[in-house]
Amino acid sequence: MNQGGITTVAYLVAGVLFIRSLGGLSKQETARRGNGLGAVGMAVAVAITAVAWASRGTEGWSMAILLIAALTIGGFIGGWLARRVEMTGMPELVAILHSFVGLAAVLVGFASYMAPGAAAFDQPGAERTVHLVEVGVGIAVGALTFTGSIIAWAKLRGTISGKPLLLSSRHGLNASAAIAIVALCVPLVLAHGTSGLPYLVTIAILAGLLGIHLVMAIGGADMPVVVSLLNSYSGWAAAAAGFVLANDLLIVTGALVGSSGAILSIIMCRAMNRSILNVIFGGFGTADHTTTGAFAAVPVGDVQELKLDGVAALLRDAKRVIVVPGYGMAVARAQSSVFELTRALRKGGCEVLFAIHPVAGRLPGHMNVLLAEAGVPYNLVLEMDEINRDFPRTDAVLVIGANDIVNPGALEDPKSAIYGMPVLEVWKAKTVVVLKRGMAAGYAGVENPLFYLTNTRMLFGDAKKSIDGLVAAVKASS
C-alpha cells in the first residue's frame, strides 16, 4: 500500500474514533471513555499527517517539524490553561477557543487564495468556481464564528452586559448582510488572479459584523445555547477549511462537530420551550420581552430567612431531599462539600437526589461535570423531565446558587423575559431552602418570586461555608 492509501486508512480510523467519541459523550457513564477515544483519534490524525509530509522530501520534513513545534507550543499553552482556569471560567474558555477555530478558517481561506499555486484556478471552469465559492464560504463562516465567539466570551466574562441588544431593524440588517455576502461571491468568481482580494476582505468584514450583531441580540438566559451554537459554527468553519484544503478528515470532523452542536442546540431549545430561530436571531418572529414582568417588578410577600441551625434541623427531619445546583455552587466551589452533606444525610436514612436543568450554569453539562468531579454517583443525578414529578413528595429542596431555572414566573408571568421556559418546579416541595449571597436577580436579569413564597426559606452567605456548616451540624446529631 502506498503512502496515500495508508493516509486514507488512518484518516478513516480517526473518523471512526471521533464518531465513537461523540457516542461516548452522550452519557455521563461513558463520557470519560468518549474523551479518550477522541484524543486517540486526534493523535492518529496528527501523526499520519506528519508522516505524510515527511515522506515528501526536505520541504516535507520542514513542514512536519513546524507541525510538531506548533503542537508542542499549543499543547503546553492548552495544558497550562486547563490547569489554571476554574470551572466557573470554563464557559469563557470554551467560547474563546471557538473563536480560534473561526480565525483559523479565515486565515486558511486567505492563504489558499493568495498561495502561489492559486493561479491555477484562474482558468475558467467549474473547478475554479467551486474552489472560490469554498474559499468565500469558509471565510464568511469563520469570521462570523470568530467575532460571535469573542462577544460570547465578553458576555460570559461580564465585560459586556448579558442583556440583549434588540435593534428595531435588526432582522433587516442581518438579512442585508447575508445577501451582500452571497452577492459578493459573484464578482469574486469573475475576478482574475488575486484581484478578487477586496471582495474577500469585504466578505470577512460583513460576516464579522453579522457575528457581533447576532450574539449581541441574544440574552443572558440563552447563553448556554449560544455556547452550543458557536460549537456548531466552529465545526462548520473547520469543514469549510477542509474543503479549501481538500482534506477529507477535516471535512468529516468539522461536519461531526457542526451537526452534533446543532442537534444539542435544538435539544436545549426544546427544553427551554424556545425556537432555535428565536435564539439565533434574538427574538425572531416573537414580541420582544422585557425583564420587568408582573412578578419581576413587584415581588409579593416577605423574605423568610433561616439560620444554619434551623436548616440543619430541617434536613435532619427530612426523609427526602432534592439538591438543585446552580452557577453559585460553581463560584463557591462547593460541589465537594455538597457531596459530603449528601453522604451524611444518606447515612442517616434520608434519600437524596440531584436535579439538573438543561441550561444550569453557563455551559451545557456544567453542573454534571462539577458533580462528577466531586464524586456524586451518576444514578443520583436526574434531569428536569425525570425529577419534576418528584417535588410534590419531597420534604426539602436545597437550591444552591440557582435562580432563573427555579423561577415560577417562567410558568406564570406572560410578561417575564423567561416566560415559557420549563423550570424545576421546586416550590411544590414541602419546604425550599435557597442558598444565596444576597437578593440579586439571576443571569437573565429577572426577579424571582420563589424567594417570597410562604414555604421558602433563605440561607444567606457563601455556599461552601454554609454547606460545610450543615455537614458539621448533621454529623454532630447522628
Image (spheres, rainbow, N blue to C red):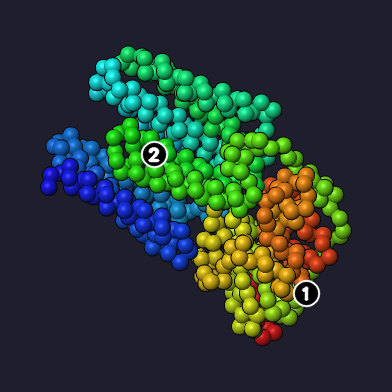
Question: In the displayed structure, does residue 86 sit left or right of residue 46?
Answer: right
Task: Give the image location of residue 249, x and y in percent.
Answer: 30, 43
SS type, badge 1: helix
Which residue does the image show at 59% across and 39% down from the upper left?
Answer: 277
Q: How many marks?
A: 2
Which residue does the image show at 33% across and 32% down from the upper left?
Answer: 244
Say few, some or many: other residues with alpha carbon within 10 Å of mark 2 (under 14 / 14 to 19 / 20 or more).
Answer: many
Given the image, on which type of amino acid does mark 1 rest? Gly
SS type, badge 2: helix
Which residue does the image show at 56% across and 23% down from the upper left?
Answer: 176
Can you say which quadrant of the picture contains the C terminus? bottom right
Task: Give the image location of residue 41, x and y in percent.
Answer: 31, 53
Residue, far bottom? 478
Task: Give the image location of residue 73, x and y in percent.
Answer: 34, 45
**Mark 2 — residue?**
238
Say few, some or many: other residues with alpha carbon within 10 Å of mark 1 (under 14 / 14 to 19 / 20 or more).
Answer: some
Question: In the displayed structure, does residue 170 sit left or right of residue 37?
Answer: right
Residue 310 - label: 1
Residue 155 can be seen, yes or no: no
Q: CA distance from mark 1 to mark 2?
A: 55 Å
Depth order, front residue of 377/156: 377
Given the image, on which type of amino acid does mark 2 rest? Ala
**Relative to 240, is 432 above or below?**
below
Depth order, front residue of 384/157: 384
For marks 1 and 2, the one nearer the N-term is 2
Question: In the displayed structure, does residue 18 sit left or right of residue 456?
Answer: left
**Relative to 250, is 132 above or below?**
above
Residue 130 - label: none
